[in-house]
Image: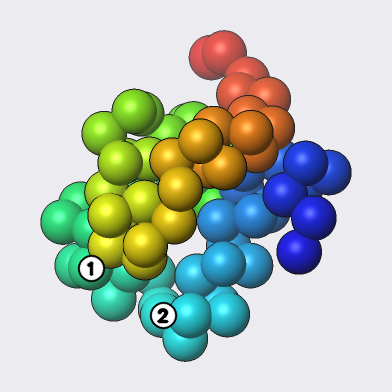
Amino acid sequence: MDEEKLEFKEWFKEFRLNQGFSQPKMAKALGVCPSTISNLEAGKTNPSPLILLKISTRFNLKIEDLRKIKLSKVEEK
């Protein structure tokens, strides 16, 4: 997976599926609402620093690597 070419929404969905997690299971693992996972994967929101920290901690990833992933283009309403 080439993180630098994917937007966060694409990277996160692919990561979740590779881990074998459903959206509700990922939400529980990260301690967030299922709608948070859905919104991240749909590109409706970008991850907050807290969400990045939770992903980093739960899955033993370097936060610096997560911060390199291109943020999704979130459309304003």
| Residue 44 percent location from the top left of the image | 52, 34
- 50 up-or-down from 59: above or below: above
| Quadrant of the frame with the N terminus | bottom right
* Residue at the extreme right: 5
Residue positioned 63% across, 20% down in the render: 75
Element under label 2?
A: loop
CB within 8 Å, label 2 to label 1? yes
What amino acid type should be assigned to the residue bearing mark 1? Ala
The answer to whether one can see residue 21 in this image is yes
What amino acid type should be assigned to the residue bearing mark 2? Phe
Q: Quadrant of residue 47?
A: top left
The answer to whether one can see residue 44 in this image is no
| Residue matched to label 1 | 29
| Residue 14 percent location from the top left of the image | 63, 67
Q: Quadrant of residue 37?
A: bottom left
Label 1 crowding class (10 Å Cα cut-off): few <14, some 14-19, many 20+? some
Residue positioned 83% across, 44% down in the render: 5
- The residue nearer to you, when weighing 60 against 38, is 60
In the image, is 25 to the left or to the right of 21? left
| Residue matched to label 2 | 21
- How many numbered marks does the figure carry? 2
Q: Residue 19 carries which label?
A: none
Element under label 1?
A: helix
| Residue 6 percent location from the top left of the image | 77, 46
Label 2 vs 1, first from the N-terminus: 2
Residue positioned 57% across, 13% down in the render: 76
- 18 up-or-down from 9: above or below: below
Residue positioned 57% across, 42% down in the render: 65
In the image, is 6 to the left or to the right of 40? right
* Residue at the extreme top: 76
